[in-house]
Amino acid sequence: MIDYHCTGGVAGSGVDLEAKMTPQVASGGLNVRWDMSYKGQALFGSPGYFDAGSRLELEGVVDITGAWEGQLKPRGAKEQEQLVPGSQLDLPSGLSYSAMLTETGTIRLKPGALNVRFTPAASERVVNDTDAAVTYPAGTWALEHPSEEFEDHHHDLHTTSEKDAVAKLTFRGTKVAYLGRRGPGLGQVQVLLDGAPVTPLLVEPGIDPDTQRPPTGTTTQVVLWETKNALEYKEHTLEIKNFEGKPVHVDAFKVTIGRLTQPPDQDKATCTIQNNPGTIDVAIGSTGTQTPTDDPTDDPTDDPTDDPTDDPDDPDDDPGTDNNGSGDHDGTVGGDQVRVVTPTTTSTTTATVTPKSTGPTATKYYRAQVANTPSGGVETGVAPDEERPPFGLMAGGMALVMGTAGGGLLLRRRRAEHAGGAL
């Protein structure tokens, strides 16, 4: 379990997260999954108004040491619904990263930093003159509600006849436009983008661009000025300044966000680990309890080295102890071993028994050896058969003695019959 504290960007002054890291091993591949959840009441918030389709992306870091060196970067993303400033952002259900591992060995996984990125959806929004994003820092402006025949946006607009009066829009986008009225008697306007004058230097709402003469009527919701080239997606300001001291209207602004290929830097949040989560050791290959490869019906003398006797001096041969002799037994699933190393103890890489391999990272394994042949024998590594009593020789000698005795008795009987006597 990993505790994170995130700041900046969509995290604002601070958001706490909790991640559960779980490694999964199957078919020579390693998948690291992080399950994410908020921890506390503070949540990631939307930095503005956005159509549905904005993405919240999380990317973690897992350092690998042991048989392999490198990093894994579990990733996950969640598309958001339509957002307004401060809307809660939904977390992805989980982060994951998969890697193919072609050799056996033991690796150690250690969680690291977590990055949070927000990518707004491509959208277009009309910002009314009464929106909080629009301020009137200079001059006297009047909010008017003309009759519906003018069809201003939201049926209102701000008006001033004071020279150098300023209306200011603060926005994030890649394009912006200024909407107002075009009609007779309206004064010139100077537009400044991020504090600098734009081209053309003056906008003339009181002139018809087609005839270059004052219009005969009033037209509403006219795009009086807009950017020609795409802006960098970041915070910008647009100022509308009364240049002549004649009537000037501010009805609305149109802010466009184009398709962004990369998450904007200003919305990124950085998360740091607040606890000591420890590490996880993963043994790739045949580990834990070994599956016998010999047929139990085979003659036990076929392979003199297949001695099942364990070496009492090898701690790895004792299934009841781990490397530290603590008596804990690592869980084994499908021959792949995963061990959580707690941060409160000094731990070492889990020693595992894996199949022989010619690769440089293969883990060696050892078997108990029998005594050598006594002096005078060939050192094969196999002890000679134990001495057995000469049962065959003894039986043959006994048969010879009994045969001799029987033959002598028969000869004496025949001699007695020939002499007419008895034995």
Image: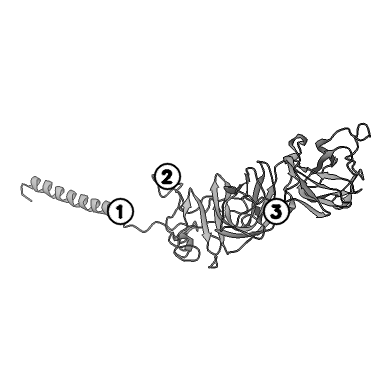
Measured from the top left, where is residue 291 in percent x and y?
45, 49
Measured from the top left, where is residue 101 in percent x and y?
61, 48
Q: Is residue 171 left or right of residue 88?
A: right
Query: What crowding class fits label 1: few (fewer than 14 Cα within 10 Å), some (14-19), or many (20 or more)?
Result: few
Q: Secondary structure at mark 3?
A: loop
Measured from the top left, where is residue 24 in percent x and y?
54, 49
For residue 370, say whether it is visible.
no
Identify the residue at horizontal 69%, vertical 51% (top origin): 47
Q: CA distance from mark 1 to mark 3?
A: 95 Å
Identify the residue at horizontal 6%, vertical 49% (top origin): 422
Comparing labels 2 and 3, the label whose residue is closer to the camera: 3
Q: CA distance from mark 1 to mark 2?
A: 38 Å
Give residue 393's mark.
Answer: 1
Q: Is residue 265 left or right of residue 343?
A: right
Q: Is residue 184 left or right of residue 66?
A: right
Mark toward the start of the polypeptide (2 vs 3): 3
Q: Which residue is mark 3?
A: 268
Mark toward the start of the polypeptide (1 vs 2): 2
Measured from the top left, where is residue 382 in percent x and y?
46, 56
Which color scheme does this rendered protein use? one colour
Give residue 295's mark.
Answer: 2
Mark toward the start of the polypeptide (1 vs 3): 3
For residue 93, say whether it is visible.
yes
Q: How many marks?
A: 3
Q: CA distance from mark 2 to mark 3?
A: 61 Å
Q: Disc 3 residue type? A: Lys
Comparing labels 1 and 3, the label whose residue is closer to the camera: 3
Q: Disc 2 residue type? A: Asp
